[in-house]
């Protein structure tokens, strides 16, 4: 497993996106001083960058192992809410002819809350830092494009694979993306995401299988792989 290189800013985003990377001390500080100071200051200055990059690399490498059976070189992949981009890094390193479009948000909420977010206001990313992360780790810019969710200029092409780990339908409603995903998927496009209501998607997709059960995360969710919208928009 190749260990990822992180600056302090990258390590901070990784901690905010994967709160399980925070140690007990940091969690105590969060409880004592509140979510604002944690999100803005402590998550940046009370972390050990090298330790965080090691833990994050291991965590994301396990995610890569979970989805690698769906990967082939030369695929067109869409990533929704990929965060700093660790999973995308491992895919692009292994499959140099694959292209990934990433749709993410470009701000860090003032007081991050990790629950279901009806309005989809919460965000914990910075798109320039994601770009810097790919550069630092040797990913060429022709291998990926980054789109800001709030600018709504989403790419329109047909994807082979769409991936959203702990973002779409984990923190916010699938509906925010359903029409768009319908328009960019074809018959065999695989859509992989973590959801707290897997059965709901049996009405939406022709085929669905559970590929991971997440018992230790914020919600007890399941990772599903779906194919073919039942109602295809023209
Ligand atoms: C819990 S983090 C998961 C990050 C990454 N997928 C991972 O597995 O480490 C959720 C991510 O979703 C992003 N996000 C929130 N709303 C979004 C939206 N509407 N579109 C794309 N990304 C979004 C957040 O900024 C955050 O980086």
Image (tube, helix red, strand yellow):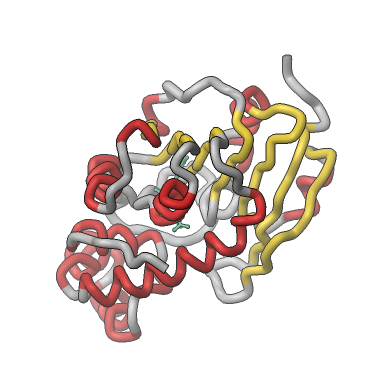
Q: Is residue 87 left or right of residue 148?
A: right
Camera-side residue of 93 and 114: 93
Q: Quadrant of the N terminus?
A: bottom left
In the figure, residue 8 lies in which quadrant? bottom left
Q: Position of residue 81 (x, y in %)?
A: 46, 46
Which residue is situated farthest in the top direction here? 234
Q: Position of residue 153 (x, y in %)?
A: 42, 21
The residue that appears at 38% across and 48% down in the rendered structure is 123
The residue that appears at 42% across and 44% down in the rendered structure is 121
Q: Position of residue 93 (x, y in %)?
A: 41, 50
Total residue callouts:
0
Q: Is residue 226 left or right of residue 115?
A: right
Q: Quadrant of the C terminus?
A: top right
Residue 171 in view here: no
Up the image or down, 51 lies above or below 166; here it is below
Q: Position of residue 41 (x, y in %)?
A: 17, 64
The residue that appears at 32% across and 48% down in the rendered structure is 125
Residue 230 in view here: yes
The residue that appears at 57% across and 36% down in the rendered structure is 75
């Amino acid at each position: 497993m190749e260990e990822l290189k992180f600056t302090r800013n990258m390590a901070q985003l990784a901690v905010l996106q994967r709160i399980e990377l925070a140690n007990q001390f940091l969690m105590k500080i969060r409880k004592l001083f509140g979510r604002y100071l944690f999100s803005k200051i402590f998550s940046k200055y009370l972390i050990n960058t090298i330790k965080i990059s090691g833990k994050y690399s291991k965590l994301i490498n396990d995610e890569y192992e979970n989805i690698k059976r769906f990967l082939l070189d030369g695929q067109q992949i869409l990533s929704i809410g990929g965060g700093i981009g660790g999973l995308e890094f491992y895919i692009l390193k292994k499959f140099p002819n694959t292209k990934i479009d990433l749709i993410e948000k470009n701000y860090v909420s003032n007081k991050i809350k990790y629950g279901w977010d009806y309005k989809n206001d919460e965000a914990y990313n910075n798109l320039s830092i994601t770009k810097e992360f790919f550069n630092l780790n040797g990913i060429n810019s022709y291998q990926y494009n980054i789109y800001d969710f709030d600018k709504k200029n989403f790419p329109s092409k047909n994807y082979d694979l769409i991936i959203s780990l702990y973002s779409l339908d984990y923190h916010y409603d699938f509906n925010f993306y359903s029409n768009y995903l319908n328009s960019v998927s074809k018959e065999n496009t695989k859509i992989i995401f973590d959801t707290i209501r897997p059965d709901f998607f049996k009405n939406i997709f022709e085929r669905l299988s559970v590929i991971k059960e997440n018992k230790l995360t914020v919600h007890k969710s399941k990772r599903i792989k779906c194919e073919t919208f039942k109602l295809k928009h023209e």
